[in-house]
Image: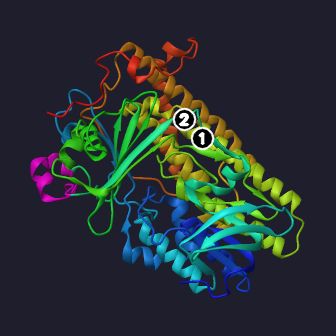
Amino acid sequence: MNATKGFEGSYDVVIMGGALSGAATAVLLLRERPQLRILIIEKSAAFSRRVGEATVEISTYFLTHSLGLTQYLNETQLNKQGLRFWFANERSQDLSQCSEIGGRYLARVPAYLIDRAALDEEVLRRACGLGADLWRTAVVQKVQLAPGGNQTLTVRYQERVMTLQARWVVDASGVAALLARQEGWWRSNTAHPTTAVWSRWKGVKDWDGPELARKFPAWASSCYGVRGTATNHLMGDGWWAWMIALKGGDVSIGVVFDQRLVTWPEGGTLGARLKEFLMRHPAGREMMVDAEWTEGDIHWRKNLPYYSTTYAGDGFSLVGDAAGFLDPFYSPGMDWISFTATCTVELILAQQRGEPMAQRVEKHNGDFIRSYDRWFRAIYLDKYEYFGEYDLMRVVFLMDLGLYYLGIASQPFKRGVKGLTEPVFTTPPSVPFFHFMRFYNRRFARMARVRRARKCGGRTNDGRRFLFQGYTFAPSSALPILKAIVSWGLLELSEGWRSWFQKEKKSVPASQRPAGRVAIKPAP
């Protein structure tokens, strides 16, 4: 897959980055206008695995309906069986005594556990098959933007430095965020200082295998579905960890923690520290006792969330992680790709049709600025305060997931691709839900802080099991949301009142927190 139109020249669209967000943008453009001259510039010789290994309903629609990958996904990836959460406290001696949240049956709306390296290569292959040129391994050194005109790129490729021109430049460079950093639009989201550590592992136990079934028969028989191909989350005070099975037997395992609430272990290799941290949790201790991380595939990223103050102009657009990143929890990254790529394609096609661009560009920027801000404040701001509380997370999970299903995920399935042209929380009907979600998220964070101050956190983290039937897009799925609201009300009456008239306090750093506030039992 190499260039065929020569080294220097002009294109309609140059896409910086050939992974999912960039290749998907090329596929969608070429399906609508096969005559477009598109060049993809990719710096890597081969894609590596990355965070973003589970889809949710929006990104599943995008991959299957928009990109046409259903058969490929069914043949090469694993079907995901929802979300599952594991909590522990000092009374939790083993896996069966951890409190659990998850589905009792199989999921009813499709999703997948994804090997991103394989998926990215497949989508890039399809983009080139539709006519896109590919320069690989090539590095974009500079982009000179000219809104309304031709953009100029300086590229190093095959030991030459060349100049290209394109009517459109699409930045799909991921966390490198080439345009946002070059133009001074890049901003760190300092309100959410999180760090991630992750790797791929071998030798992780089978959640659904005979060993655990013999060891914990009542625990095994309580779930009628499959636990192993859910995205399993280990939950702790100020942190969470994922366990995601991948096709072929590897398991992706990583931790994300709030730097204000968690002190990361010192000394030893990064892989050893990751295993040490997870082995303190009874579920991690059971599943990972014989597990080994893959050498050379252990990663650390500090200060995860960031955003751009500009998302597009008449001649450029940012897609995927190049436009911003929120948090890995609930896997929003591929939803973000779905929205940014779809809206970028709409923007470019409008210009190609000769339509006026000023208002479209203004709306595009306004929509994504609002979407990032509201998405963050409704879901993620201070959420790590109550990750280690089973009863709080059970209620919030029902409301978060139910509102996502009925208000967001259902839209493309019911309305087609138009549902991907309206980013989260940007339409008038969504605004009351944003305010509602932001309010209850703040209330649960306040309750968790009061528990922490009273040294009574994690009290329901053992011996509880909430296995539910799951959501659909039917109106009847609103019932669990209503039940969760009632449960929230009861929590407010039983303990929330303690914080009703208190002044808001900031999170207490991990180094200053009282001894004994440990939501997990140390490994023996």
Name the residue that disc number 1 marks: 376
Q: Is residue 250 left or right of residue 13?
A: left
The reply to whether discs 1 and 2 touch (Cβ–Cβ < 8 Å) is: yes
Inspect this view and state whether residue 466 appears. no
Q: Position of residue 22 (x, y in %)?
A: 60, 68
- Toward the viewer: 205 or 23? 23
Q: Quadrant of the C terminus?
A: top left
Mark 2 is on which residue type?
Answer: His
Task: State the SS at label 2.
Answer: loop
Q: CA distance from mark 1 to mark 2?
A: 9 Å
Q: Earlier in the sequence, mark 1 or mark 2?
A: 2
Mark 1 vs mark 2: in front:
2
Mark sitting on residue 406: none
What's drawn in magenta, residue-wise? 203-221
Q: Position of residue 20 (x, y in %)?
A: 54, 67
Residue 501 occupies which quadrant of the picture? top right
What is the crowding at mark 2: few (fewer than 14 residues within 10 Å), some, or many (at least 20)?
many
- Say above or below: 385 vs 2: above
Q: Position of residue 182 (x, y in %)?
A: 69, 52
Q: Position of residue 259 (x, y in %)?
A: 45, 32
Residue drawn where x is 88% and y is 70% of the image: 355
Q: Is residue 348 left or right of residue 92?
A: right
Residue drawn where x is 69% and y is 72% of the image: 14
Mark 1 is on which residue type?
Answer: Phe
Name the residue that disc number 2 marks: 192
Query: Which residue occupies the extreme left position in the image?
Result: 214
Task: State the SS at label 1.
Answer: helix
